[in-house]
Amino acid sequence: FQDAAGFGAREQKSDVGVFDFHVHAGTGENETPAEVAGRAREAGYKGITLLMRCSAADLSSHRIASFMSACREAGLYGGCETIPGVELVHLPPPLISEKVSEARALGVPFVAVHGEYPGGLVPEGTTMAAIRAGVDVVLHPGSLALEEASLAASTGVSLELSLSPTYGFFNGHVAQVCIKAGAQLVTGSNVRDGGVFMNLFLRQAVIRGSGL
């Protein structure tokens, strides 16, 4: 993750490819991590973060260990750097810090939380609770407030600029708030179940269309 985290600042100066921080595979998904990593490689991506969606009851040591092992094997043999992680979804905000700590204790190297996207039925206060808990990324934080972005900037929490047609409608707002606050943005596509990785030309178009 440390190598991947600085990649956004380098990508326009290098031809080594790009990184997608929001990809799904694993238990309950149709594709294995190796299959997803292979498709990402073919699409020109340097690496991906593979996320397992988890609720409050899903953070079992056996399930997490199996998933992380499969992701690491995919990274070794799939030709695409593959970082295992979890996406904590629809948790009551008071539980988020506890579950983030639980995931870290299980050795999960990348922890994300499903942010407050309008219409997404995510409890109010989720984005702020995730930032205070020190997650790596808050995903698609569509209704992002300046206070939240400022706290993210001061604590090193990244915020997602979504490449997903479902969650990308608020990218312009998220980008402008993050610029004002000095918060770090990363890109993620929410690819899953055989979904197509966005080609690099269209990916740049989405980013520029967000005002960046």
Image (cartoon, helix red, strand yellow):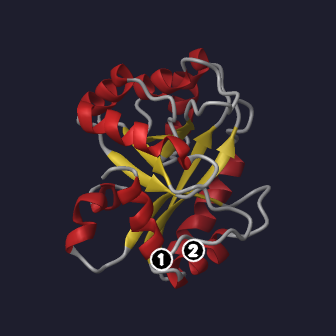
**Residue shown at 43% from the left, 55% from the top:** 187
Q: Residue 66 in the image: x percent, y percent? A: 67, 58
Is disc 2 placed on a helix, strand or loop?
helix
- Taking 57 as reference, is 103 left or right? left
Q: Is residue 85 left or right of residue 160?
A: right
Task: Give the residue at x 65% y 19%.
Answer: 92
The residue labelled by disc 2 is: 37
Q: Which comes sooner in the sequence, label 1 or label 2? A: 2
User: What SS does tag 1 mark?
Assistant: loop
At 68% from the left edge and 33% from the top edge, which residue is drawn? 120
Q: Does the residue at mark 1 contact the one at mark 2 (Cβ under 8 Å)?
A: yes
Q: Is residue 113 left or right of residue 15?
A: right
**Disc 2 residue type (three-letter):** Ala
Looking at the image, residue 176 lies above or below residue 161: above
Crowdedness near tag 1: few (<14), some (14–19) or many (≥20) residues, C-alpha within 10 Å? many
Q: Nearer the viewer, residue 44 or 134?
A: 44
Horizontal and vertical percent position of residue 89: 65, 35
Rendering quarter of residue 135: top left
Q: Quadrant of residue 176?
A: top left
Image location of residue 3, percent across then percent down: 30, 61
Amino acid, disc 1: Cys
Depth check: 163 or 93 in front? 163
Taking 193 as reference, is 15 above or below it?
below
Image location (x, y in percent) of residue 177: 33, 33
* Residue at the (50%, 30%) spot, across then down: 101
Report the front residue among 153 and 79: 153
The total of numbered circles placed on residues is: 2
Residue 80's mark? 1
